[in-house]
């Protein structure tokens, strides 16, 4: 994407009512005004909150929001030029149950209160295969413990990826930690039946590219108790 397009998207994001872009210092200093009261201030209802981490273009947040009007969705990514498309699509479709937040995922405990999030989606994250990069994986044990702090007991995390390594890594974490409980696992969702419809019916930009390359797409879901 050219720099002119990025600047245009950054400018448009500033006009979108469904885009929230707090300063990092505001969050770090515990001054983020929506923490604990997302439903009251943003969605103005008491519906469950589902978060998409590393939401990219926001395909999952928008598609799920269309399907489930009584659930609130928050797409999080540090790159506002990416989720510009999701924010724009949500506005054009008059979706009031989805917003986008520009921030770092490692700050998530300063963004939500305990028991504020019911479900998390992580779609096609960087697998960070090298051992020294493990701390950056969105599904490493430290991150999952952070997610646990903001989720309801028994909250669900969904991982959809083209990385068999990451899929297997997560299965290993689930089997090795008592507070995690596997719900479902599929190593190739388009060749093996049984996946929930929203797993095969919603495709991200990157997923479409991976399918063109004949890469198998994996999916698993698990509870955090």
Image: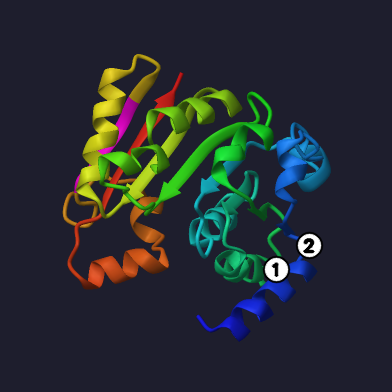
Please tell me how crowded label 1 is: few (under 14), some (14-19), or many (20+) other residues with Cα within 10 Å: some
Q: Which residues are magenta?
A: 182-187
**Image coordinates for residue 208, horizontal then vertical, percent:** 33, 69
Q: Is residue 97 magenta?
A: no
Q: Nearer the viewer, residue 85 or 49?
A: 85
Q: In the figure, is residue 65 to the left or right of 11?
A: left
Image coloring type: rainbow
Q: Nearer the viewer, residue 24 or 5?
A: 24
Q: Which element is circle 2 on?
A: loop
Q: Which element is circle 1 on?
A: helix
Q: Main secondary structure of the magenta part?
A: strand
**Image coordinates for residue 153, horizontal then vertical, percent:** 53, 20
Q: Residue at x 76, y 46 (%)?
A: 43
Q: Which residue is mark 1?
A: 91
Q: In the figure, is residue 93 to the left or right of 216?
A: right
**Mark closer to the chain start, 2 or 1:** 2
């Amino acid at each position: 994407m050219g720099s002119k397009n990025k600047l245009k998207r950054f400018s448009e994001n500033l006009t979108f009512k469904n885009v929230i872009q707090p300063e990092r210092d505001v969050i770090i200093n515990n001054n983020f005004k929506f923490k604990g009261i997302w439903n009251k201030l943003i969605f103005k209802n008491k519906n469950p909150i589902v978060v998409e981490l590393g939401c990219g273009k926001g395909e999952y947040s928008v598609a799920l929001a269309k399907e489930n009007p009584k659930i609130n969705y928050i797409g999080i990514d540090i790159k506002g030029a990416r989720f510009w498309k999701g924010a724009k699509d949500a506005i054009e479709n008059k979706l009031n149950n989805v917003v986008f937040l520009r921030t770092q995922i490692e700050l998530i405990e300063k963004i939500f209160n305990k028991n504020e999030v019911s479900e998390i989606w992580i779609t096609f994250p960087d697998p960070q295969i090298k051992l020294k990069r493990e701390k950056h994986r969105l599904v490493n044990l430290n991150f999952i413990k952070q997610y646990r702090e903001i989720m309801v007991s028994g909250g669900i995390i969904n991982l959809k990826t083209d990385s068999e390594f990451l899929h297997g890594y997560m299965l290993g974490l689930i089997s090795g930690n008592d507070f995690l409980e596997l719900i479902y696992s599929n190593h190739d969702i388009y060749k093996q039946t049984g996946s929930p419809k929203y797993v095969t019916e919603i495709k991200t930009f990157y997923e479409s590219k991976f399918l063109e390359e004949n890469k198998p797409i994996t999916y698993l879901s698990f509870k955090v108790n």
